[in-house]
Amino acid sequence: MVHLQCLPPSVEPRVSDHMPHIIDMIKQIVDNGYAYRVEGDVFFSVENFPEYGQLSGRKLEDNRAGERVAVDSRKRNPADFALWKSAKEGEPFWESPWGPGRPGWHIECSAMSAAYLGYSFDIHGGGMDLVFPHHENEIAQSCAACKQSNVSYWIHNGFVTVDSEKMSKSLGNFFTIREVMDLYHPLALRLFLMGTHYRSPINYSDVLLESASERIFYIYQTLHDCENVLSQHDKGLQESIPPETLNVINKFHNDFSTSMSDDLHTPVVLAALSDPLKTINDLLHTRKGKKQAMRIESVAALEKIIRNVLSVLGLMPTSYSEALQQLREMALKRAKLTEDKILQKIEERSEARKNKDYEKSDAIRKDLADVGIALMDSPDGTSWRPAIPLPLQEQQVAAT
C-alpha cells in the first residue's frame, strides 16, 4: 500500500477491542424492538424493519436463505440474521447479557464505524459483493440502533478479472500486488487501476500493464524534460501566458473538476492529460514550439497544473529521474537484458547503418522491440526507452 502511494488509514480497529460497543449496540437494537433472543443467540428481525432492501433493491421475498449455510429453523423469517451467536466449543467467546458468545458477522462494522465516525458519516466503501447481505444488514442494524444513522455515499468497487476471467484461487489465476510490483513499477500499477472506473470490473492482462507502464514513462519523461528546462530559467519569468496555453490549462482543469465530481471518473482525467502533455512536448521539442512567445512561462504553467492533478491522483513520484530509472530497470528485468547488452546492440546497429547494412540494422531494432525496448534516433545519437513489446502491441491491435 505504501508503494502504491495509498494514504494510511487513520484508525485500524480490531473487533476484539470493541466488544463493549458491540454489546451496547445489540442491546439498543433489542430495546428498540428490532431483534429477538432465541436461547443464547440474538437475531435481527427483517420484517420489523420495512426499509430492508433499500441499498440492494432486493425485496424480502427475493432473499433466498440457506444458499451458503443451512437455514436455522428457530428464526422467525429465514432472512433474519445473527447479531450475537452463542459460544461453541473450541471457539473464542465473550460474556454478554445473552450468555457467552461472539458477535455476528455484520454487527461489528456498524459498532466500530459508530464508535469512530458517529452514526452519520460521508463515505462507506467495499467490494460489489458486499452490497448484499453485508451492507444491507449494516444499514438495518445501524438505523435500528439510531434512527438518525445515515451514510451519504456508498462506494462499491468492481472485481479484478484476469484475461476476462474472474480472479480466484480455484482457477489458479490468482496473484498478489507484490508479484506484480516485482516486474512493474507500483505507480504504473496505480495508473492501470485508475484507467478503469472503480465501480466497473477491471481486466488484468500483461498488455494493459505494459501499456500503463509505457504511459507513465511518457508522463514522467515529459515532466523531467520540463524540470531540466525550467531549472535554467528560474528567474525573470512573466506572470502572464499566451491565450492558447491558457485555453489548454482551463480545459484540462474543467475536465478534471467535472470528471472527479462525477463519481470519481478517473479514466476521463487520465485521457485529458494528453493535451497538456502534447503541448509541453511541442513547446520543448518542435521548431514551431521553440519559437513561441512566452514559451518558458507556458511550460511552467502546464507543468504546475499537471503536477497538481498527479498529486491528487497519488501519481506523483518523489523524483522524476528516480522513477524513470526504476521504470527502465523493470523494463530490463522483463526483457531479461542488461543495459550494457542494449548499448552493445545500439553500437552494432550504428555500425550496420554506417555500412549501409539496413537489414541487420532493422533486425536489431525489431529484436529489441519484441522484448519491449524501443530505440530512438536523434541528432545526438540513439537512446532507448521502455515500450510495449511488439507481440503484445500486435495482440492489442488484433483485439481492437
Image (cartoon, rainbow, N blue to C red):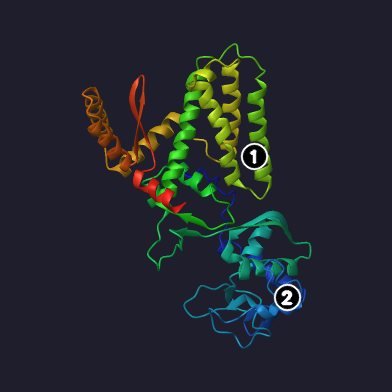
Mark toward the viewer: 1 or 2 = 1
Q: Which three-letter amino acid code belongs to the residue tagged 1?
A: Phe
Disc number for residue 30: 2
Is 221 or 82 nearer to us in this picture? 221
Looking at the image, residue 123 lies above or below residue 296: below
Q: Which three-letter amino acid code belongs to the residue tagged 2?
A: Val
- Residue 144 % position (x, y): 74, 70
Disc number for residue 256: 1
Residue 313 can be seen, yes or no = no
Is 14 or 237 nearer to us in this picture? 237
341 left or right of 381 in image: left
- Residue 205 % position (x, y): 42, 53
Within-10-Å neighbours for mark 1: few <14, some 14–19, many 20+: many
Quick one: which residue is furthest to the bottom in this view? Answer: 73
Mark 1 or mark 2: whose residue is earlier in sequence: 2
Residue 325 can be seen, yes or no = yes
Which residue is located at x 44 percent, y 49 percent?
208
Looking at the image, residue 21 lies above or below residue 30: above
- Residue 137 % position (x, y): 66, 70
Q: What element carries label 1?
A: helix
Disc number for residue 156: none
Q: Is mark 2 on a helix, strand or loop?
A: helix
